[in-house]
């Protein structure tokens, strides 16, 4: 599935992923391909991004997550990579 993480200043991430783990306001959200449609605010904190051969962590502030059939979009006020 495609993951796009966007802030007002830039596109922070845009690539194919196998799994996204984020902290929603009502609990953790694990997103796999073909996940049901969803729009929710996220708690400030880390989002784990898994691709076939690696895992990355980006810390978000003021974010919303939208899931569609084959695409996940995260709109955030700010984003910072844990390690880059």
Image (cartoon, rainbow, N blue to C red):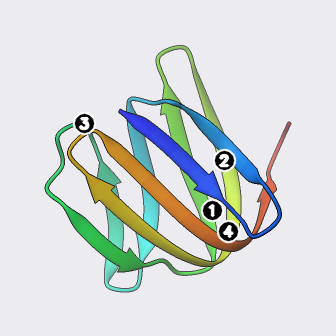
**Of the numbered discs in the image, which one, if any, rests on residue 60?**
4
Neighbor class of circle 3 (other Cα within 10 Å; few <14, some 14-19, many 20+) is some
Q: Would you say 14 lies left or right of 25 here?
A: right
Q: Quadrant of the N terminus?
A: top left
Neighbor class of circle 1 (other Cα within 10 Å; few <14, some 14-19, many 20+) is many
Q: Would you say 55 lies left or right of 10 here?
A: left
**Do tag 1 and tag 4 residues touch (Cβ < 8 Å)?**
yes
| Cα distance between the residues tagged 1 and 4 | 6 Å
**Do tag 4 and tag 2 residues touch (Cβ < 8 Å)?**
no
| Cα distance between the residues tagged 3 and 1 | 20 Å
**Of the numbered discs in the image, which one, if any, rests on residue 57?**
2
Residue at figure coordinates x 67%, y 68% from the top left: 60
**Do tag 1 and tag 2 residues touch (Cβ < 8 Å)?**
yes
Foreground label between 3 and 2: 3
- Could you say whether the residue bearing mark 2 is in a helix, strand or loop? strand
Residue corresponding to mark 1: 46
- Could you say whether the residue bearing mark 4 is in a helix, strand or loop? strand
Residue at figure coordinates x 57%, y 57% from the top left: 47
| Cα distance between the residues tagged 4 and 3 | 22 Å
* N-terminal-most mark, 3 or 1: 3
* N-terminal-most mark, 1 or 2: 1
**Of the numbered discs in the image, which one, if any, rests on residue 14?**
none
Across and down, in percent, residue 44 comes to 62, 79
Q: Is residue 1 above or below residue 31?
A: above
**Of the numbered discs in the image, which one, if any, rests on residue 33?**
3
- Could you say whether the residue bearing mark 1 is in a helix, strand or loop? strand
| Cα distance between the residues tagged 4 and 2 | 10 Å
- Could you say whether the residue bearing mark 3 is in a helix, strand or loop? loop
Foreground label between 1 and 4: 4
Across and down, in percent, residue 40 comes to 35, 78
């Amino acid at each position: 599935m495609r993951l796009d993480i966007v802030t007002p200043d830039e596109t922070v991430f845009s690539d194919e992923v196998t799994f996204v783990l984020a902290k929603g306001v009502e609990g953790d959200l694990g997103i796999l391909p073909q996940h049901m449609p969803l729009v929710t605010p996220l708690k400030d904190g880390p989002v784990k991004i898994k691709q076939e051969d690696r895992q990355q962590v980006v810390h978000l502030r003021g974010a919303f997550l939208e899931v569609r059939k084959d695409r996940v979009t995260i709109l955030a006020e700010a984003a910072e990579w844990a390690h880059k």
